[in-house]
Image (spheres, grey):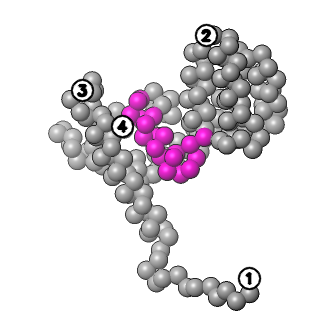
Amino acid sequence: MPGLIPQPLPTDFNMDKDDLRRNKTLGKNLMCRLKCMFTSSSAPERLSLEDTQQWSQSLERLLGSKYGLATFRTFLKSEFSDENIEFWLTCEDYKKITSSYKMSSKARKIFEQFVEAESPKEINIDYHTREEIKRNVRSPTTQCFDEAQKIVYGLMERDSYPRFLRSEMYKTLLESLAADDPLG
């Protein structure tokens, strides 16, 4: 565009520093929310340092913890990459459906939301898996999304999960719990 002169960035502008500050703030805000959600007297169990440390053992362990799942989802949302966990959780719920009418309706919705090319929350799966699901949705069973779910789980395990473990959000949560730990 002629006539536009690029403006120099302010001298105090540092993207890495700003990102780090934002992530630390996210971690602290998350910690406050988690404490409010999970340490109230009505909660049957509290979020503990030991449980939180165990999330680093495996993605399965992380997703098996209601606190871990909530934290991981928040992390993925902060990165604008929550479609994989949302798809995986939706498939887990889908497998519990017993009514064939509800299964058919839900399978179509899952396909339209996550699997179909250019869908709002399109997951990253190969063409053949996408086509197989397209066929499966015509006569849905509880297993019609299994292959895509395995692919998505593998992607999370290799990509999102390691990023989560390295994130300021997770580190801040651990630090905060360690500071509150009467044994630490």
Element type at mark 4: helix
> Could you say which quadrant of the image residue 131 lies in?
top right
Q: Earlier in the sequence, mark 2 or mark 1?
A: 1
What is the crowding at mark 4: few (fewer than 14 residues within 10 Å), some, or many (at least 20)?
many
Q: Is residue 8 left or right of residue 150?
A: left
What's the CA distance linking mark 3 and mark 2?
32 Å
Comparing 24 with 82, the one in front is: 82
Please state which amino acid type lies under the numbered disc 3: Ser
- Where is residue 122 shown, x and y percent of the image? 69, 41
Q: Which residue is mark 4?
A: 52
Q: State the quadrant of the N terminus.
A: bottom right
Residue 23: horizontal and vertical position, in percent? 42, 57
Amino acid type at circle 1 is: Met
Q: Tell me the chief SS of the magenta region.
A: helix
Residue drawn at (28%, 40%), measured in percent from left and top?
A: 35
In the rendered image, is residue 12 in sight? Answer: yes
Magenta stretch? Answer: 65-83
SS for dot 2: loop
Residue at the spot of label 3:
42
- Residue count near mark 2 (Cα–Cα under 10 Å), binned few <14, some 14–19, many ≥20: few
- Mark 1 sits on what residue? 1
Between the C-alphas of marks 1 and 3, the distance is: 60 Å
User: Which label number is shown at residue 98?
Assistant: 2
